[in-house]
Image: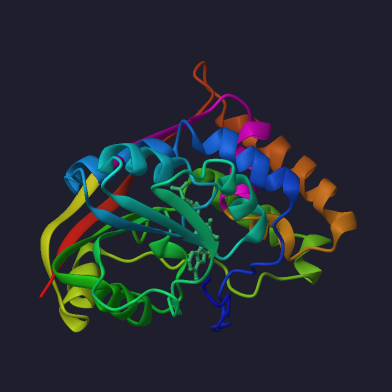
Amino acid sequence: MMAARHLRLAGAPSLSLDSDELARDYERISATRQFQSGQRLAADLDIKPGERVLDLGCGTGLLAEHIAERVGPDGFVLGVDPLPLRIEIAHSKRRNNLRFEVGDAYHLDGIADGGLDVVVMNAVFHWLPEKTAPLLECARVLRAGGRVGISTMLKGQRTRVHEIASKVLAEPPFNSFPRPRPQLAFPVTADEMRAFFGMTGFVPSLIEVCESTRMWPSPEAAIRYSEVSTFGNFLGHLPPELRGRARIAIRQRLQNLMTADGIVHHGRRLVAIATRR
Ligand SMILES: C[S@@+](CC[C@H](N)C(=O)[O-])C[C@H]1O[C@@H](n2cnc3c(N)ncnc32)[C@H](O)[C@@H]1O
């Protein structure tokens, strides 16, 4: 069992704003979003039968379950996430070659050195305020020649939804409760990713900026997506009695973004694969 120690780095997202409802909705909503980029990452990593894989920041375990099918009965997948309510949902997917634990990318204490073939971080890296400690942990648990695969937000790629939300939250009465920092996540550029790999004992084989289109059928859906995928941090800095008002105010502004296809965001994200020296 892994020790669930949580190092609180300055500006790190809160890990105590999650709820049963957010976790359940994440499972449903991510099935057509993060899960798809995760499946592509697993294919790009060429995860093979028999491999031992860590899905780091596994959320509710959809991708870990998919990877367990890829590695088959001779392989093994461990899913780790700091949010107990998401791991609770993930447990229902447990089987002989798939296990889940509450844990944190900064402290993979319970995992032995050099025992893994692959570490996957899908939609997780941008949540880590400091990048070298988790990558050094990945390097420690991977065998020489093992791979790390990362699909993450690209720096400078804020959605219009988040821009509009930030404007609303900068107005009264919400501005009496400012966010700890203007942007919730800590995205990197392709060059920064390359540098982080270099500093932590990895040799990159792929660092690619990919087109990424997101569509939400309604303003409500866009807001809910933001709440579930930030595990409550999107509006979590506000007192509970103001969150409903903030949702209404953001929803009204988002109406302007509605097209016949709903709210559409054409953006870019970063996919990176590297091998441990
Ligand atoms: C958008 S979800 C992605 C979940 C999953 N990888 C997927 O593809 O659906 C981001 C996840 O990052 C996790 N996370 C945040 N901080 C973390 C940390 N320090 N260590 C490991 N995971 C973390 C969150 O708990 C959350 O489940």
Q: Is residue 179 magenta?
A: no
**Residue nearest the observer in this picture, 88 or 75:** 75
Residue sitting at x 53%, y 62%: 101
Asked if residue 251 lies left or right of residue 115, the reply is right
| Magenta stretch in the rendered image | 211-229
**Res 153 seen here:** no
Q: Is residue 217 magenta?
A: yes
Residue 14's image quarter?
bottom right
What colouring method underlies this structural image? rainbow
Residue sitting at x 79%, y 40%: 248
* Numbered label tally: 0
* Relative image position of residue 169 (x, y in whole percent): 70, 58
* Relative image position of residue 58 (x, y in whole percent): 47, 54
* Relative image position of residue 128 (x, y in whole percent): 45, 71
Residue sitting at x 58%, y 80%: 5
**Res 49 seen here:** yes
**Residue nearest the observer in this picture, 271 or 117:** 117
Q: In the rendered image, which quarter contains the C terminus?
A: bottom left
Residue extending farthest to the top is 260
**Residue nearest the observer in this picture, 137 or 124:** 137
* Relative image position of residue 83 (x, y in whole percent): 61, 61
Residue 258's image quarter?
top right
Residue 108 versus residue 50 in the image, above or below: below
Residue 70 versus residue 184 in the image, above or below: above
